[in-house]
Image: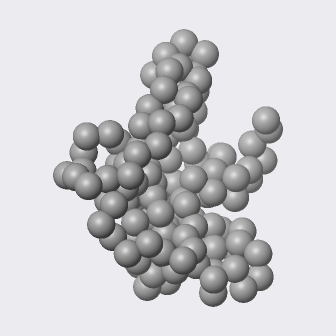
Amino acid sequence: MKNTHPFWQIIHTIPNFPKPNIDFYDITPLLWHIDELVDALLGALPNNYLDTVECFATTEARGFVIGSLLSGRTGKPLLLIRKKGKLPPPVFSQTYDLEYGTDTLEIKADLPPPKSYWWTMYWQRAVH
């Protein structure tokens, strides 16, 4: 996949990390361009789509950062998706495959279910 968005001039690619044949994308330098980042993410949504989103669902580390920026800009709540064992019960769990194994994500089971959410993993597609 060719990364053509201008943000890819800012994101650092670290080859063979965390394992051989896996590339790590360091978004730390991108966080010096917060307004441009949030504008690009929100601009990637279809017209009026944000009106249908009740909250942002975000995964560990980078997702928490990106989701917090979006939540802060829009005033919409943030649903944290955590790695297995990081939340007290009750939780909902989902196991999934990685390039180098499997992992499990969890969310609190006792939160009111959002009618709609925007999972911030979408941002990766938004900047390609």
Instruction: Give the residue furthest to the top.
Output: 20
Q: Is residue 86 visible?
A: yes
Q: Relative to the observer, which residue lies in front, 37 or 113?
A: 113
Tell me, what colour scheme is on the image? Answer: one colour
Residue at position x 55%, y 61% in the image: 119
Q: Relative to the observer, which residue lies in front, 72 or 83?
A: 83
Above or below: residue 71 compared with residue 109: below
Above or below: residue 58 compared with residue 34: above
Residue at position x 63%, y 57% in the image: 122
Q: Is residue 60 visible?
A: no
Q: Is residue 17 left or right of residue 46?
A: left
Above or below: residue 43 compared with residue 80: below
Q: Relative to the observer, which residue lies in front, 58 or 65?
A: 58
Q: Relative to the observer, which residue lies in front, 32 or 127?
A: 127
Instruction: Give the residue furthest to the left.
Output: 88
Q: Quadrant for the N terminus, please.
A: top right
Q: Residue 85 appears at what percent x and percent y? A: 25, 40
Q: Is residue 114 left or right of residue 8?
A: left
Q: Residue 39 appears at what percent x and percent y? A: 61, 74
Residue at position x 58%, y 48% in the image: 10
Q: Is residue 3 left or right of residue 120?
A: right
Residue at position x 43%, y 85% in the image: 75
